[in-house]
C-alpha cells in the first residue's frame, strides 16, 4: 500500500515509525517530515497547507492511503478537497471531514455538540461582540476561577484561566474587542472551572465503531512541579495509574459512545483519531476538549504501546470494520521526555547541532525527532520542542530513569527538559 503521511513533528515521527513496521506500508512517504521520519520512509517537500500540491503528489505517485497528522489541514477541509476530485476520492483518507474536525476547530461547536448528547462537560455560555454587554454581566456573577476560551484554533494558547472578575473582563475585552487571537477569538466560550486531574483517551473510529487506544497523561507546563507557562507538552506517560477499568468504563459509556452516536446522528463523516481531553472530578470524567488527531507528545507513548499493525487498523477503519479489531497492548509503562530549546515556549534560538542521537540506546528507548532539520549530514535544532525520548519500563520510574540516562548522552546548545515527568506516580522514600 502506497502511503503518504502529513506532518513534521514528534507525533509524525512516532506515526511514521509505527507505519514503517507494517509490511503493508510500501512505500511510505512523509510530507514534509523531519530527519527522524527520513529513517522510516521517504520525506517529500510539500507544504501541508497546499492542497493542490498534496493532491497532485497523491495522483502522480498513485497513493492508496493518506494519513493526516496535524489538525490544521483537517479543519481547513482537506478531506472535502480529496472527495471533490475524481482522481483522489478513492484514496483511503485517515482524518475526519471538516465538520468532524470542528470538534477541535470550534470550542462553541464542541460544547453545543456535547450538550446535545448529554456528554459531561463544564457549564458554559458563548459570546461574540453582539452580546458583549450580556457577557460582562455574566462574568460579574460567575464563580471563580473563570475559564475563557477563544472559539477557534489558537495553537494551544487560546485558554485563559482568570482568578478574579477584573482579570476576566479584561481578558474578555482583549479577545472580543482587540482580537487577541485574531479570528479565533471573534467568539469566546466562558466556562465553569473544573477541579480535578487531567488525562487523555484516544480512539480510532470509522464513524460507527471505535477501537480504544491506551490512555495517557501529558505534562503541559514548562517547569518542574507543573509550574511556569503552558506548552504543547513537555512529556507524557501511559498507562495512567489512576485510570482504573472502572473509570475507563465511565469514559466509554458517558463520553465515547455518545460522541460516536452524535457523529452518526448528524451524519458527520469521521475516519480517524479522536482525542478526548478529560478531567477526573471525584471519580467522574468530564470533557475539557476534543482534538481531531493524536496528541503530541501523547502519540510518542501511546503508539509504541499498541502492538497491532497500524496499517491494518487504518484499513479496518476505512472498511468500517473496527468492531472486528482487538487492540493488543504492551503492558509496560511508557514515558516520553521532551527536550526543548532554551526559552521555549517563549522566544528561543535554533540552528544548533545535536550530538549523540545516533547512538544505539537499546530496545527499551526510542528517540523521536520533532523540531529538527538536516544540514550537511548533521541534525540541527529547528523548533521549540526538539526531541522526545520515549522509554519503556516495568513501571513509570524505571521508564523515566531510562529516558533521563539517554538524555545525558544527547546534547545541543540550550538543551532543556523536565526531569520530573510522571512525578506524582513515583513513590518517594517517605511513601513507604
Ligand atoms: P484546552 O485547550 O481546552 O485543552 O485547555 C487548555 C487547558 O486549560 C486544559 O488542559 C486545562 O488544563 C485547562 N482547562 C480548560 N478548561 C478547563 C476547565 N473548564 N476547568 C479547568 N481547567 C480547564
Ligand atoms: N499535548 C496536547 C495536544 O496534543 O493537544
Image (cartoon, rainbow, N blue to C red):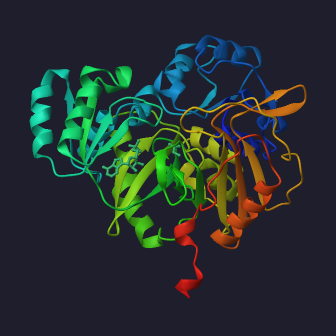
Quarter of the rendering containing residue 43: top right
Res. 260 in view: no
Task: Choose between 40 and 219: the one closer to the eye.
Answer: 219
Res. 112 in view: yes
Q: Position of residue 69 (x, y in %)?
A: 60, 35
| Residue at image location 59% in from the left, 39% down from the top | 343
Quarter of the rendering containing residue 412: top right
Task: Choose between 234 and 332: the one closer to the eye.
Answer: 234
With 287 as the anchor, is 225 left or right in this view?
right
Q: Is residue 119 above or below residue 265?
A: below
With 81 as the anchor, is 338 left or right in this view?
right
Q: Position of residue 307 (x, y in %)?
A: 70, 58
Task: Choose between 354 and 362: the one closer to the eye.
Answer: 354
| Residue at image location 55% in from the left, 57% down from the top | 224
| Residue at image location 80% in from the left, 49% down from the top | 410
With 303 as the anchor, is 77 left or right in this view?
left
Q: Position of residue 60 (x, y in %)?
A: 75, 14
Q: Is residue 196 above or below residue 388?
A: below
Task: Work out which residue is located at the far bottom of the displayed protein and give it.
Answer: 432
Task: Choose between 252 and 111: the one closer to the eye.
Answer: 111
Q: Quadrant of the C terminus?
A: bottom right
Q: Quadrant of the N terminus?
A: top right
Count of numbered badges drawn on the protein: 0
With 130 as the anchor, is 40 left or right in this view?
right
| Residue at image location 57% in from the left, 13% down from the top | 85
Amino acid at each position: 500500500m502506497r502511503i503518504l503521511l502529513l506532518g513534521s513533528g514528534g507525533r509524525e515521527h512516532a506515526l511514521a515509525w509505527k507505519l514503517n513496521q507494517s509490511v503493508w506500508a510500501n512505500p511510505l512517504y512523509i510530507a514534509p517530515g523531519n530527519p527522524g521520519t527520513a529513517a522510516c520512509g521517504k520525506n517529500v517537500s510539500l507544504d501541508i497547507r497546499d492542497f493542490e500540491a498534496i493532491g497532485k503528489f497523491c495522483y502522480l505517485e498513485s497513493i492508496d492511503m493518506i494519513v493526516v497528522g496535524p489538525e490544521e489541514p483537517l479543519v481547513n477541509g482537506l478531506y472535502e478537497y480529496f472527495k471533490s476530485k475524481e482522481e483522489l476520492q478513492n484514496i483511503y483518507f485517515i482524518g475526519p471531514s471538516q465538520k468532524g474536525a470542528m470538534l477541535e476547530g470550534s470550542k462553541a461547536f464542541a460544547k453545543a455538540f456535547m450538550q446535545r448528547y448529554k456528554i459531561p462537560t463544564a457549564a458554559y455560555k458563548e459570546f461574540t461582540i453582539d452580546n458583549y454587554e450580556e457577557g460582562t454581566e455574566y462574568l460579574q456573577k460567575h464563580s471563580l476561577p473563570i475559564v475563557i476560551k477563544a472559539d477557534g484554533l489558537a495553537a494551544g494558547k487560546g485558554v485563559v484561566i482568570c482568578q478574579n472578575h477584573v482579570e476576566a473582563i479584561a481578558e474578555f475585552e482583549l479577545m472580543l474587542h482587540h482580537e487577541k487571537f485574531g479570528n479565533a477569538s471573534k467568539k469566546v466560550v466562558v466556562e465553569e472551572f473544573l477541579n480535578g486531574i487531567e488525562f487523555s483517551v484516544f480512539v480510532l473510529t470509522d464513524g460507527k465503531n471505535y477501537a480504544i487506544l491506551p490512555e495517557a497523561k501529558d505534562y503541559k507546563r514548562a517547569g518542574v512541579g507543573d509550574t511556569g507557562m503552558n506548552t504543547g507538552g513537555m512529556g507524557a506517560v501511559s498507562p495512567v495509574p489512576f485510570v482504573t477499568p472502572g473509570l475507563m468504563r465511565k469514559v466509554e459509556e458517558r463520553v465515547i459512545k455518545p460522541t460516536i452516536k452524535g457523529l452518526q446522528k448528524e451524519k458527520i463523516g469521521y475516519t480517524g483519531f479522536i482525542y478526548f481531553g478529560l478531567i477526573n472530578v471525584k471519580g467522574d470524567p468530564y470533557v475539557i476538549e476534543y482534538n481531531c488527531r493524536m496528541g503530541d507528545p501523547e502519540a510518542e507513548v501511546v503508539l509504541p504501546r499498541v502492538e497491532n499493525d497500524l496499517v491494518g487498523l487504518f484499513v479496518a477503519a476505512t472498511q468500517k470494520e473496527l468492531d472486528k479489531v482487538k487492540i493488543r497492548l504492551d503492558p509496560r509503562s511508557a514515558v516520553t521526555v521532551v527536550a526543548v530549546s532554551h526559552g521555549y515556549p517563549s522566544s528561543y534560538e535554533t540552528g544548533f547541532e545535536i550530538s549523540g542521537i545516533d547512538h544505539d540506546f537499546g530496545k527499551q528507548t526510542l528517540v523521536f525527532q520533532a523540531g529538527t532539520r538536516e544540514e550537511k549530514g548533521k541534525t540541527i535544532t529547528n523548533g521549540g520542542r526538539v526531541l522526545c525520548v520515549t522509554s519503556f519500563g516495568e513501571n513509570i520510574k524505571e521508564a523515566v530513569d531510562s529516558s533521563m540516562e539517554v538524555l545525558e548522552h544527547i546534547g545541543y546548545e540550550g538543551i532543556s527538559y523536565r526531569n520530573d515527568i510522571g512525578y506524582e506516580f513515583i513513590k518517594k522514600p517517605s511513601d513507604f
